[in-house]
Image (cartoon, rainbow, N blue to C red):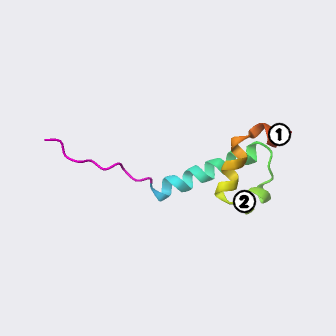
């Protein structure tokens, strides 16, 4: 009989790592570090969806 396996939860450390990587990507695209620090994680993700708009 197969035992019920729950899907592993995403960890907090992994989330922080992802968010830091996303911030580094924005800075690499040319957004100033001061601006990125003030942004919420959701705003960072939204900007990364359209990198062509950042360069222009």
- Quick check: is 6 in the magenta stretch? yes
Disc sitting over residue 55 in the figure = 1
Q: Secondary structure at mark 1?
A: helix
Left or right of 51? Residue 21 is: left
In this rendering, the count of numbered labels is: 2
Q: Nearer the viewer, residue 25 or 45?
A: 45
Identify the magenta region.
1-10
Left or right of residue 22, residue 15 in this image: left
Q: Residue furthest bottom?
A: 38
Residue at 62%, 53% (x, y): give it.
20
Local packing at callout 2 (Cα closer than 10 Å; few below 14, some 14-19, many 20+) is: few
The residue positioned farthest toward the top in the image shown: 52
The kind of secondary structure element at disc 2 is: loop
Q: Could you tell me what secondary structure mostly forms the magenta stretch?
A: loop
Q: Which mark is residue 22?
A: none
Q: Position of residue 18 (x, y in %)?
A: 57, 49
Single out the residue that lies furthest toward the right: 56
In the image, residue 10 sits, relative to residue 53, either above or below, namely below
Residue labelled with disc 2: 39
**Picture quarter with the C terminus:** top right
Dot 1 or dot 2, earlier in sequence: 2
The N terminus - image quarter: top left
Q: Residue at x 69, y 42 (%)?
A: 49
Cα distance between the residues tagged 1 and 2:
18 Å
56 to 10, vertically: above or below: above
- Label 1 with label 2: CB-CB less than 8 Å: no
Q: Residue 33 magenta-drawn?
A: no
Residue name at image x 65 percent, y 55 percent = 42
Tell me the residue at 27%/47% (across/down). Answer: 5
Give the x, y percent position of residue 37: 72, 60
* Label 1 crowd bin: few (<14), some (14–19), many (20+), radius 10 Å: few
Q: Position of residue 41 (x, y in %)?
A: 64, 57
């Amino acid at each position: 009989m197969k035992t019920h396996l729950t899907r592993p939860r995403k960890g907090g450390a992994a989330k922080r790592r992802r968010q830091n990587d996303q911030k580094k990507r924005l800075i690499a695209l040319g957004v100033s570090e001061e601006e990125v620090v003030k942004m919420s994680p959701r705003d960072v993700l939204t900007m990364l969806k359209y990198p062509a708009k950042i360069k222009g």
